[in-house]
Amino acid sequence: MKLSVKKRDIHGKKVKNLRAQGLVPAVIYGKHVQAESISCVKNDLLKVYRTAWYSTPVELTGDVDHLVLINSLQLDPVSDEIISADFLAVSRTEKVAAKIPVVTFGESQLEKLNEGKIMLIKDEVEVEAFPQDLPSKFEVDISVLETVNDVFFVKDLKVSDKVTILDDPELPILTVSVLEDEEPAAEEGGEAAAEAPKAE
């Protein structure tokens, strides 16, 4: 996956001019590189991010040549538009730690029968691997939870032997929230109110 970038010598308030041209100011940094200021086309960055997320290596081309991970994206609090980006330069020969998003799929019989609601407790899991071996995401089928007592833990994830999970294996990823019937509670409240002594 590639992203074309250009070196940037515009900083501070002047970066507004870049954004007006559909460009995103960004910075590259890492253990073996000096920090560099760059810019890229916003729509190109969006396309790459939607596929790479924060865990798939991206090859920067153009004015610089680095293998990077998208480390963070800063969004405008009002418009949600990307206003800046940070890239972490990585090496294919050194392992890196990255947070991998958890994505659910499938159909839950518990939810279908109105017996419970599947809750995503942990939406990312930290792992360590060589950049090229990092998974883009963890997909979890919610149908594996068949009873209200079932829990899907970090240790239940299927991972390659090239990937080491850094998070506590006993942390829950999916749990079941029991749906409570509010009517009895309302009735009890009504009875309690009826039985309460009147203030004299």
Image (cartoon, helix red, strand yellow):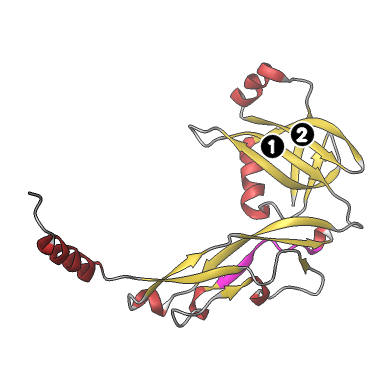
**Element type where label 1 sits in the image:** strand
Crowd class of label 1 (few under 14; some 14 to 19; many from 20; radius 10 Å): many
Q: Which quadrant of the view contains residue 9?
A: top right
Q: Residue furthest front?
A: 200
Give the residue displayed 77% in from the left and 53% down from the top: 57
**Element type where label 2 sits in the image:** strand
Asked if residue 12 lies left or right of residue 79, the reply is right
* The stretch drawn in magenta includes residue 137: yes
Q: Residue furthest bottom?
A: 146
Instruction: Answer whether labels 1 and 2 touch (C-beta < 8 Å).
Output: yes
The stretch of residues the image draws in magenta is 133-140
Residue beneath disc 1:
85
Q: Earlier in the sequence, mark 1 or mark 2?
A: 2
Expressed as whole percent of the image width and height from the top left, the position of residue 114 reads: 32, 75
Asked if residue 151 lies left or right of residue 177, the reply is right
Give the residue displayed 73% in from the left and 38% down from the top: 86
**Picture layout, residue 72 above or below residue 134:** above
Expressed as whole percent of the image width and height from the top left, the position of residue 78 reads: 48, 32
Q: Which mark is residue 41?
A: none
Expressed as whole percent of the image width and height from the top left, the position of residue 186 reads: 19, 64
Q: Residue furthest top?
A: 14
Q: Which mark is residue 27?
A: 2
Number of marks present in the image shown = 2
* The stretch drawn in magenta includes residue 108: no
Asked if residue 162 lies left or right of residue 185, the reply is right
Q: Which quadrant of the view contains residue 137?
A: bottom right
The amino acid type, in three-letter code, at marker 2 is Val
